[in-house]
Amino acid sequence: MHAEKMKKKLYARRTHKCVWQTVYHTSMTEQGSTFEDPTATPMTTPAELTSVPTGSDMTSLAGFYFQCAVVFIGLVGTASNALVLYAMVASKQHKKHMLVFNQNALDFYSCFFLVITYSVKLCNIYLSGSLGYWLCAILLSENLIWFGIIGSIINLAVITVERYLKVVHSVWSKKNLRKWMIYSAMAFSWLSGITYNLAMNFSTTGVIDGVCYGSVIWESRVAELVHGIWNFVSFYLFMVLLFFFCYWRILMAVRRQAKVMATHSGPGPSTAQAQSTKIQSSIIKTMILVCAFFAITWMPSNIYYFILNINSNLTMLEDAYYVFLFISFLYICTNPFIYAIKFEPVKRVLLRLIPCKKTSEEDIEIAGNTGTTRPTRADKY
C-alpha cells in the first residue's frame, strides 16, 4: 500500500477517528513518509478526547475556530484558577481544605497547558525526525493537558470520599483519618494521572507525513475496545455513581443531624458552632455543584466516544466533535467561578480585589474566639 493511499484512508475518517484499516509495513521512503508503528491500527480512545490528528492536518475552518476558542477559554481558566488559588492562600483555607486547593491546582495546570498546546497547534508545524516525534508525543498529543485532567477527576473522587467519611462516619474519621493520608491522596492524584497518560500515550501515538496522531494507533481492535469500555466505566460512569451515592448519604446525614440539634439544643447554638456548620455546609454545596457540573459537561464527549468504540461504522459530524470537546474543556476552565461564588472565604478575598467593592478589613473580619462580627460603616450611623 502506497503512502498516499494510507494517508487518504486515515484522513477520510478523521472527523470521527474510527480508522479500522490495517496499515501494512511497506517502504515509504519514495514518498518521504514517516510512520512510527507500521503494524498498528489507528484508533481513538474515549480517554484522550483530543485524539484528532494535529499539526498540518488540522486545516478545516471549524478546527481553526475551535482551537482559537480553546486558547481563549484556557487563558480565562488559567487566570481565574490562579485567583482562586491566591484567595485560598490569603484566607488560609489551603491548610483547612487541602484537597480542594489541590483540585484548583490541577485545574490551573490543565488550563495552562491547554493554552500552550493549542497555541502550538495553531502554528501548524510540519513534524519530522526525532524532534517532531517527541513534540507530538509530549505536547501535540495533549499528553501534558491530560496529566492534569485525569488527576483532577481522581482528586474529585477523593474529595467526595473524604466529605462522605467526615459527615456520615464522623466518629471513625476523627479517630483514623490523618493528614498523611490526605497528602498521600494529593500525591496519588498527580502521579496516577501522569503514569496513566504516559503508558497509554506513548504506545498509541505516531507521526505520519508530518501530522501528529495522538492516542489513535492501536495494535488490535480488541485492545482498543477493552480500553474504551474500561475508560468510560472508570472515569465517567463510576464517578457519577460515586457522586450520587456519597452526596445523597451526606445530605441525609446533615438533615438528620440538624433535627437532632434542633431537638436537644438550648435556646440557640453557639455562634462558633453555627459558623462552623455554615462553613461545612458551604463546602458540601460547592462540591455538589462541582460534581454535577462535571457529570453534565463530560457526558456528551464520553457518550460520543463510547458509541464510536462500540460501533466502528458510525459516522459522526466534525462540528459535533468540536462542540462536545469544547463543552468538556469548559469544566476545567469554569470550575474556579463556582468556588468564587459559593465558597465564602474565597469570595470575601476576591471581593477585596475589586476596586468598587473594596472595603476595609475591619468591615469583613470575624473576631477570632468571640464569634462576633466587627461593626461595618453602615452600623455606625
Image: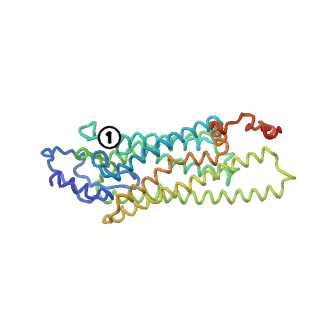
Which residue is more in the foreground, 296 or 80?
80
Residue at disc 1, secondary structure = loop
Q: Kindly identify the residue that appears in the image at 53 percent across and 58 percent down.
A: 240
> Which percent across, then down, holds residue 9?
22, 57
Q: Which of 73 and 168 is in front in this view?
A: 73
| Viewer-side residue, 92 vs 80 | 80
Q: Residue at x 42, y 41 (%)?
A: 115
- Judge whether residue 136 can be spotted in this image: yes
Q: Position of residue 374 (x, y in %)?
A: 79, 37
Q: In the rendered image, which quarter contains the N terminus?
A: bottom left
The residue under label 1 is which amino acid type? Cys
Which residue corresponds to mark 1?
123
Relative horizontal placement of residue 222, taking residue 240 as reference (left or right): left
Q: Residue 227: image x %, image y %?
A: 38, 56
Q: How crowded is mark 1: few (under 14 residues within 10 Å), some or many (20 or more)?
A: few
Hey, which quadrant is residue 311 in on the image? bottom left
Can you say which quadrant of the picture contains the C terminus?
Answer: top right
Q: How is the image coloured?
A: rainbow
- Residue at the far right in the pictured view: 267
Q: Position of residue 213 (x, y in %)?
A: 30, 48
Q: Can residue 181 be seen in this view?
A: no
266 lies left or right of 202: right
On the picture, is 319 further left or further right than 193? left
Q: In this view, does 3 lie above or below 314?
A: above
218 to the left or right of 89 = left
Disc tally is 1
| The quadrant where residue 132 appears | top left
Residue at far left of view:
30
